[in-house]
């Protein structure tokens, strides 16, 4: 490991994986509740399982982003982190706040939770993905400001690179967009309008900058390709991302009461959103093909290539399937949306965090890569999780197409619950593939505990990090 302070990334990575496990477990609970409605009721109602599932996803990805940044920025800046102690203190504050929030969801009725956490003074609760109590949101802002201060000071005192600059732009954008979660107007149209400023401009805006920066960093490390080549690709990708992503927000405004011109703006620019993901796929494979060396961490290379392909399929292709206004008129809010969401989050963000963990954790532990036995297990986990998410997406897509036809398009549309019974088979198949995904995640965790000799690495390999 090049800089001692990079070790602060380790607890963030460990906590991220722990929360990932919790997210998947509650996802399986939800999946079973789709077909066995009273499963674990009243201990864990569906709405509570869903809150924990989605909130755990957001928190563990943020943990992963933070750990990745704490590892990446010192190495890019060629200097130690400004304050490792601050980074560790913020980690514990964030982890305890997340744990208490989840316990609040599970143990206290949501209305009571809102009352005892001061939501009446500054109402922010009750919105999808932003269910966190107001006091938790304030805590997130405090942690984010401390985190960004630490990274920015590190950046300013060291070398400035395109990768660290784009990463910081994405992280600052993430924090700024989150401030819209505190704006909760009484008018439902305005509420939804600005709610998407958080949700869409995160996952289809600034998070993509973070994704691009992390992927570029890992590719430099494992391929030895000149930084200038990778940075040129990165500039092209983020430009396309920002142009299509920001105006593509319009595809969320189609049917909420916003002006009709959003149907054109949203359709046109949303149709362009797959382009940066396709460029990312071409970029990743092009860079790996041009590699100057064979890195001993083959698992990290596999994760990096998989990220680009699955991000293109999930966020690009499956996003485009239902993004045009005339199509979205029938599909919004159906299982087609869920299909897109599952593959997009996994392909774009879950996989890039796992890529960084796969690359950085062995280095933090004092080796260039895990043992060959460990990497074989890790690559099995890659294929199990990736293939299972593909089948989850296909099953939900089939369920969504049938749902759209039976419930919204046919000459004799059927009630929602009647349609749910007819597509239950796809929910059972989704549940089975979810168990396979969990198995893959367990193997990923186990791979870090497999003993064996680390692969041999040359001095050239170890030193070629600029």
Image: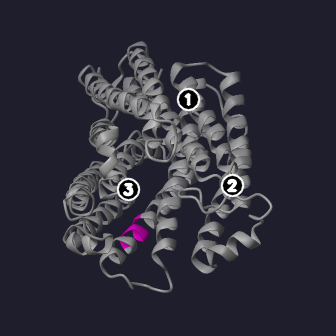
Cα gap from disc 2 to disc 3, whole angstroms: 26 Å
Q: Secondary structure at mark 1?
A: helix
- Magenta-drawn segment: 24-28
| Mark 1: few/some/many CA within 10 Å (<14, 14-19, 20+) | many
The residue sitting at 29% across, 49% down in the picture is 375
CB of mark 1 within 8 Å of CB of mark 3? Answer: no
- Report which quarter residue 287 is drawn in: top left
For the residues carrying marks 1 and 3, which lies nearer the camera in this image?
Answer: 3
Near-viewer residue (86 or 134): 134
Q: Does residue 230 appear left or right of residue 383 in this picture?
A: right
Say left or right for 157 vs 430. right
Indicate yes or no whether the magenta region holds residue 25.
yes
Q: Which mark is residue 75?
A: 1
Q: Which residue in the structure is indicated by mark 3?
A: 333
Residue 133, horizontal then vertical, whole percent = 68, 63
Q: How is the image coloured?
A: one colour
Q: Is residue 146 visible?
A: yes
Which of 361 and 258 lies nearest the eye of the viewer? Answer: 258
Residue 299 appears in view = no
* Quarter where residue 427 is shown: bottom left
Comes first in the chain, label 2 or label 1: 1
Residue at the disc numbered 2? 137
1 or 3: tag closer to the N-terminus: 1
Horizontal relation, residue 437 to residue 220: left or right:
left
N-term mark: 2 or 3: 2
Above or below, 434 against 200 in this view is below
């Amino acid at each position: 490991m090049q800089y001692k302070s990079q070790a602060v990334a380790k607890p963030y990575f460990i906590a991220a994986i722990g929360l990932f496990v919790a997210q998947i477990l509650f996802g399986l609970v939800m999946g079973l509740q789709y077909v066995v409605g009273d499963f674990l009721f009243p201990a864990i109602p569906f709405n509570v399982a869903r809150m924990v599932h989605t909130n755990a996803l957001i928190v563990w990805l943020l943990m992963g982003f933070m750990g990745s940044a704490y590892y990446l920025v010192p190495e890019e800046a060629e200097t130690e982190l400004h304050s490792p102690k601050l980074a560790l203190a913020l980690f514990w504050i964030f982890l305890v706040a997340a744990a208490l929030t989840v316990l609040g969801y599970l143990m206290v009725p949501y209305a009571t939770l809102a009352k005892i956490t001061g939501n009446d003074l500054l109402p922010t609760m009750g919105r999808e993905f932003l269910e966190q109590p107001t006091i938790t949101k304030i805590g997130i802002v405090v942690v984010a400001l401390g985190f960004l201060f630490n990274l920015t000071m590190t950046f300013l005192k060291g070398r400035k690179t395109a990768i660290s600059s784009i990463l910081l732009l994405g992280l600052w954008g993430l924090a700024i967009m989150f401030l819209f979660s505190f704006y909760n107007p009484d008018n439902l149209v305005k509420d939804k309008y600005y709610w998407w400023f958080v949700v869409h401009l995160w996952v289809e805006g600034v998070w993509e900058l973070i994704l691009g920066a992390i992927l570029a960093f890992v590719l430099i490390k494992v391929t030895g390709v000149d930084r200038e080549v990778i940075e040129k690709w990165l500039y092209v990708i983020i430009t396309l991302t920002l142009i299509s992503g920001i105006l593509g927000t319009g595809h969320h405004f189609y049917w909420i009461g916003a002006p009709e011109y959003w149907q054109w703006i949203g359709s046109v620019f949303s149709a362009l959103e797959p382009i940066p993901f396709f460029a990312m796929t071409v970029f990743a494979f092009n860079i790996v093909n041009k590699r100057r060396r064979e890195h001993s961490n083959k698992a990290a290379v596999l994760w990096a290539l998989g990220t680009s392909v699955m991000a293109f399929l999930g966020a690009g292709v499956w996003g485009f399937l239902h993004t045009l206004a005339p199509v979205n008129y029938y599909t919004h809010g159906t299982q087609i949306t869920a299909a897109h969401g599952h593959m997009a989050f996994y392909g774009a963000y879950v996989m890039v965090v796992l890529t960084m963990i796969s690359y950085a954790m062995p280095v933090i532990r004092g080796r260039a890569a895990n043992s060959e036995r460990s990497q074989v297990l890790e690559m099995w986990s890659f294929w199990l999780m990736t293939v299972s998410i593909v089948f989850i997406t296909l099953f939900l897509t089939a369920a969504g197409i049938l749902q759209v036809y039976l419930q919204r398009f046919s000459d004799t549309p059927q009630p929602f619950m009647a349609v749910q019974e007819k597509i239950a088979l796809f929910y059972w198949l989704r549940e089975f593939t979810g168990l396979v995904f969990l198995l893959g995640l367990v193997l990923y965790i186990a791979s870090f505990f497999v003993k064996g000799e680390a692969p041999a690495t040359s001095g050239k390999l170890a030193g070629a990090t600029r």
